[in-house]
Amino acid sequence: MPAAPDPSGPPGPPASLAAPGLPRTSREIRLAATPEGLPEARHLTVVETPLPQPGPGQLLVRNSHFALFAGLRTLMGAENDGVPLPPLRAGDTVIGPAVGEVVAAPAGSRLRPGDPVTHLLGWREYAVLPAGDAAALGDVLPDPVAHLAQGSSAYGALTRLAEVRPGDTVLVTGAAGAVGVLAGQIARLLGAGTVIGTTGSPAKAERLVAELGYDAVVLRGPEDFTRRLAEAAPDGIDVLLDLVGGEQLTAAVAVARPGARFALVGALSGQLAAGRGGGSAPAEIDTYRMIVKGLSVRGYTGGDHPDVGAEWNRRFGAWLRSGRITFPYTAVAGLGNAPRAFEELLRGRHFGGAVVEVFS
C-alpha cells in the first residue's frame, strides 16, 4: 500500500481509498430501539454503510472477531450514570472488545497495515479510530482471539483485592459466564484449595466440575440457597469473587469465615433483571454478621488497577501455552448472527463467553 501522506503537507486521498481490494461498503450493527427490559435481537439491526474513511491520526481496521458482554445491557438501559463507557441510544452503533488487522495507518504511527490489534469498536466489519485507541497484539498470547477473554477483572480482583492464599476456599458466583469460567481456574492457579461455583443450569454445573476444576457447584433455585451453599462449604469460605450479587451475596455473608475477603466484580442479578434499568442491583446484607466476622468487601474496577492488564496477559499466555488454563467460549459465525447471540447470552444460554467471527 502506498505510504500515507505527510499530514504537514497538502492533503491527499483518504488512506483507505488508496488500499487495493477494499469494499465500498461495510456492515455494522446499531441499536434500533431502546429496549424496555432485557434487550432482544429485534432491538438490534444490521446496517450497510459506506466504507468509513480514516482522517488525520486515525486507523482503518478490518475486524475479525469481537466479544459479546452482558454489560452492554447497562449501556442500553436507563441506569447508566457513572458507567465508564458511553451510553447507547437508538441509532448508535454498538461497541465492544474486538481484534482485527490494520488496513490503513497515518504517517508516523507505530502501527502499520497488516498489524493485528485490539480495540473497543466491535460490532462492525471495518472500524475507524484514533491510532492511540488500538493496541498491538504482539505474541504474548498464543491466539489473537484469547485477547477477548474476560479474565482480567477476575485476575485483578483475586490478586489485588481478595488476594487468594494457599488452601483458601473460594466461591465464584455466576461461574458459567464469561468471567466465571476463567475465575475458578485462576483461583486454583493462585493456590486455592477448594473452588466452589454457582450457576442456574445443571448441565453447566456438570461441565464446571468435569472440565474446569470446580470442586462443587451450587444451583440457584426456589429452595433455600444459603442452606445449599453451607452444605457445599461446611467450613465456610475465605474468598468471594462475586459476579451476581442479590441472594447469592446475601448467602455468602452467612457462610463466610472470620476475616473472609469479598471482591465484587459484577452485579448480574440486577443488570439482567427485566424489571430494572440495568444499572442497579439491590441486595439484603446482614451487616451485623459482616462486623462480627470482620469481613472486607471491596468493589473492583479495572481503571483503579492499570497495571493488571499487562500482568494478566503475561500470566494468561504462559498458562495457555502450558495447558494449565482453557478459554471456553461459544463461537458465533457471522456478524448478522450477533443480535440473536447477544439475546441468548443475556438469557444464560451460553457456556462461557461468546465471540463473533465477523466474516464467517
Image: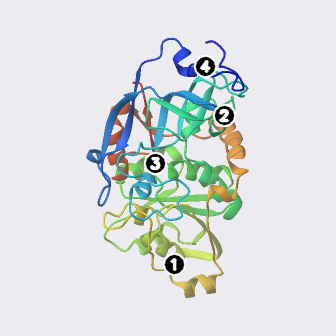
Which residue is more in the foreground, 162 or 150? 150
Q: What residue is disc 3 on?
A: 69
Asked whether the residues under the numbered discs 3 and 4 touch, taking CB atoms below 8 Å apart as contact, a structural biologist would say no
Q: CA distance from mark 2 to mark 3?
A: 27 Å
Q: Secondary structure at mark 3?
A: loop
Q: Indicate left or right for 201 with 314 as reference.
A: left
Instruction: Please provide percent x and percent y for residue 315.
Output: 70, 42
Quadrant where the image shows the C terminus: top left
Marking on residue 12: 4
Residue 288 seen anywhere in this rendered image of the structure: yes
The disc labelled 2 sits on which kind of residue? Ser
Point out the tag, 3 or 1, that comes first from the N-terminus: 3
Residue neighbourhood size for the residue with mark 1, other residues' Cα within 10 Å, grouped as few (<14), some (14–19), many (≥20): many
Residue neighbourhood size for the residue with mark 3, other residues' Cα within 10 Å, grouped as few (<14), some (14–19), many (≥20): some
Q: Secondary structure at mark 2?
A: helix
Q: CA distance from mark 2 to mark 4?
A: 49 Å
Marking on residue 322: 2
Residue neighbourhood size for the residue with mark 2, other residues' Cα within 10 Å, grouped as few (<14), some (14–19), many (≥20): few
Instruction: Please provide percent x and percent y for residue 109.
Output: 70, 28
Point out the tag, 2 or 3, that comes first from the N-terminus: 3
Residue neighbourhood size for the residue with mark 4, other residues' Cα within 10 Å, grouped as few (<14), some (14–19), many (≥20): few
Q: Secondary structure at mark 4?
A: loop
Point out the tag, 4 or 1, that comes first from the N-terminus: 4
Q: What residue is disc 1 on?
A: 254
The disc labelled 4 sits on which kind of residue? Gly
Which dot, 4 or 1, sits closer to the camera?
A: 4
The disc labelled 1 sits on which kind of residue? Ala
